[in-house]
Image (cartoon, rainbow, N blue to C red):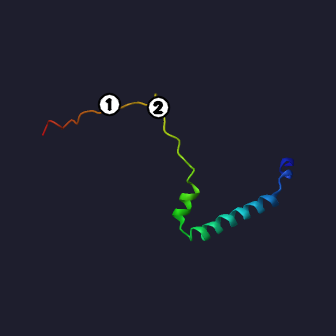
Amino acid sequence: MEEFEDIDYQSISRDRKQLDRLTSDRYWSEYKGDWKAYLTDAFRWDDEPPSQPNPFSVKIKEKPHPFGEWI
């Protein structure tokens, strides 16, 4: 419990309230409640890393359909 005595809960609460205020003010003032444009702008720098081919993946050969020549 001694390690938790050093945590300043007031600053954490103050910072969280400031973050909430800044994001909601920006949402309503700049985007006028348009959630799609807001989220597009908020996550514009999040890029998915390019997928790398897995050399250990199993490649299943396509089998011919059993009734392909029957009909």
The single residue placed furthest to the left in the displayed view is 71
In terms of depth relative to the viewer, which is nearer, 7 or 51?
A: 51
Please give the label number shown on residue 61.
1
**Which of disc 2 and disc 1 is earlier in sequence?**
2
- Name the residue located 60 percent from the left edge and 70 percent from the top edge: 28
In terms of depth relative to the viewer, which is nearer, 65 or 11?
A: 11
**Quick check: 18 left or right of 64?**
right
Q: The residue under label 2 is which amino acid type?
A: Asn
- Name the residue located 60 percent from the left edge and 67 percent from the top edge: 27
In terms of depth relative to the viewer, which is nearer, 64 or 42?
A: 42
Mark whose residue sits in front, 1 or 2: 2
Please give the label number shown on residue 41.
none
- Name the residue located 73 percent from the left edge and 61 percent from the top edge: 16
Mark 1 falls on what kind of element?
A: loop
**Quick check: 22 left or right of 53?**
right
- Give x and y (percent) for residue 45: 57, 50
Q: Crowding near pointer 2: few (<14 within 10 Å), some, many (20+)? A: few
In terms of depth relative to the viewer, which is nearer, 39 or 60?
A: 39
Mark 2 falls on what kind of element?
A: loop
Which residue is disc 2 drawn over? Answer: 54
Q: The residue under label 1 is which amino acid type?
A: Lys
Q: Quadrant of the C terminus?
A: top left
- Give x and y (percent) for residue 69: 15, 35
Q: Is residue 46 above or below residue 9?
A: above
